[in-house]
Amino acid sequence: MQAFLDIFDIYLLEAAINGILFGGVLALLALGLNLIFGVIDVTWICYAELIMIGMYGMYYLVSVYGVPYWVAAPICILLVAGLGMLLHFLVIAPLLSSPPINQLLATGGVLFFLQSFATVAFGIEFHNIGIQLPVLRFGEMNFSYARLLSFAAALVGMVSVYVFMKRTYTGTAIRAIAQDRQIMALMGVDTRKIYLITSALGGSLAGLAACLLVLLYDVHPFIGLSIGPITFLVCVLGGLGNFVGGFVAAFVFAEIISLGGMFSDLEWGYVLAFGFFIIMMFIRPAGLLSRRQ
Amino acid sequence: MNARLLAFAIAGAALIALPFIHRDPYHLHILILILIWSFAYTSWSMMGRFGLVSLGHGGFMGVGAYVTALLWNHLGIWPWIGIPIALVCAGALAIVVGYPCFRFRITGHYFVLVTLALSGIVLQIITATRDYTGGSLGYTPERTTGNHVLALQFDDKTTWYMIALGVWAGGLLIWRWVDRSMDRYALEAISEDEDAAAAAGVNVTWEKLKITVISALMTAFAGALYCQYQMFISPDTVSGIAVSLQMVFAAIVGGLYVALGPTVGAVITILMAEILRVGFGTRAVGWDNLIYGVLLVLFIIFLPKGILGSLLARLGVRR
């Protein structure tokens, strides 16, 4: 019995730590979406599909053309940032004055488009980037370097966004627009420019996430459907547009999935997490960190 | 008015007579699919037209299809009893998710994302209980050895065509019933301004819940029907976000504010997919959705009322 408990605890600890590592990546995913929502008041339903395109970019640069990972990563981040700007320019900007639901559904159309574009252009096979990172053994627990690396990179990404938002003029303007979008136009801020910069920033966060996720998962055209929903749930759980809330919610969610998945199949971890989400929506409709009304 | 009634009668008679005149099984198959999906899209639009955009309908459809099939295979319960049970399950699900949403004023983006979670849950549960549901490989209701009527399994396409036609017409009647009821005005007021509607004496929670349950029941019924007709269901074809988005797309393209809009949407989307599939074979994989995606964006930007809606508005026809 004692031996059983010892093993059990080690697994529990391993799952908990893996949950934290996963939470870092989720937090990064949620940050980009929250930024877009907080500033432009639009939900990019196709956010995960942008990540998918970025992952394909990484796969082709690294595996097919033999570009070193560290060179390919910035290229991909720029590529997805460009896609984000394009998305804003082509789809969101013409719809800014129409009902918010229309903007959301239009990005749903972009989701379809990107997904099938990937199917047509890259095929439906699963692709692996082919970089095997070693496994870190710590006591009896195993952690993959890929997860550690992505956790660290996610933290760096989040801190740099935080610094950008707090210390630069543009960042201040972005935060100001998030607070009041009518007044800022009167204060001489070019909202169109700020929206484009925000879209590029959101896109580059998606690009960074793509560079990290490509180390953890195989790329295929439908990967967006497995990472997209969870990202939205994290954002809503934290309160759409609430950066700190999204950060906390990401870790709560990742722990539920990791620990819940430990006892049974991984899907049950997701089911638990989704169930938790729906219950929390009723207890705290405006997000985890909101004050009770 | 009489001319209009006459036109409806002629159209109805033509639709009923069609399978007896034109017996090509492939064409009938396409028509049956169009009718079943039209019914599903119509049920989505029942909510969608009042600004209640749900991405959870894939979940309701999955419940309808899987509960019916599971009861039949594991317990031998006829679909005649299984479908009502499945509808009760879907209705309960709609209440469990809908009531708190409406009670706590979860609207707009939040409502969309909560319902998105719902279709995610249903999809994950179907995949997770793979010992019973076959997981992502799909599920086949067992062929009956006894009475075909009791098992609701017919080999004859004409029978299915009649069933689908009846259900589709039923869906349009429900639409008309809602359209002419006081609830419609209440729901339109709610979609304009919830607080003002509540101040004017509209029971916001109750009205929204009512239309949500109606819509969920219809969608689950469409799922069960689809399962009985195709005799094969998989999580990707009857549940999940992709199916929900497919409903949204067809309804918007056809026009979600007019009764026949979702039907027009179903005709366009299914015909386009079939033409691409027949014309280009396996090379067409993905192209249909590629075109859907571009069209969806273009429609929302330039033609938010949809094809039929814009056409009727241009002709000045009143609904």
Image (tube, coloured by chain):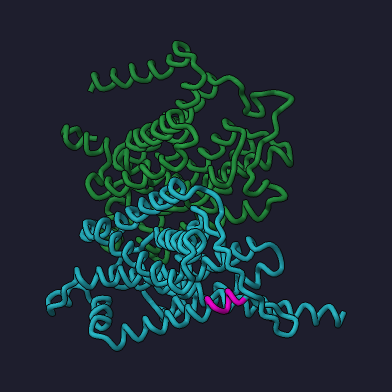
Chain colours: A cyan, B green
The secondary structure making up most of the magenta span is helix
Q: Is residue B156 left or right of residue A169?
A: right
**In the picture shown, does residue B120 fall above or below B314?**
below
| Place of residue B156 in the rendered image (x, y in percent of width and height, measured from the top left) | 58, 19
**Which residue is rendered at x = 37% and y = 43% of the image?**
B292
Q: Quadrant of the C terminus of chain A?
A: bottom left
Name the residue at the top extreme.
B21
Q: Is residue B303 left or right of residue B25?
A: left
Choose between A18 and B230: the one closer to the eye: A18
**In the picture shown, does residue B20 fall above or below B192?**
above
**Which residue is rendered at x = 24% and y = 19% of the image?**
B2
**Which residue is rendered at x = 31% and y = 44% of the image?**
B295
Range shown magenta:
A145-150
| Place of residue A122 in the rendered image (x, y in percent of width and height, measured from the top left) | 47, 50
Q: Quadrant of residue B66?
A: top right
- Confirm whether the magenta stretch covers residue B184: no
**Which residue is rendered at x = 63% and y = 80% of the image?**
A17
- Regarding residue A166, the answer to whether it shows in the image is yes
- Regarding residue A240, the answer to whether it shows in the image is no
**In the picture shown, does residue A138 fall above or below B123?**
below
Q: Quadrant of residue B171?
A: top left
Name the residue at the bottom extreme.
A167
| Place of residue B264 in the rendered image (x, y in percent of width and height, measured from the top left) | 34, 33
| Place of residue A109 in the rendered image (x, y in percent of width and height, measured from the top left) | 36, 50
Choose between A8 and B182: the one closer to the eye: A8
Name the residue at the right extreme.
A1
Q: Is residue A157 left or right of residue A201?
A: right
- Confirm whether the magenta stretch covers residue A148: yes
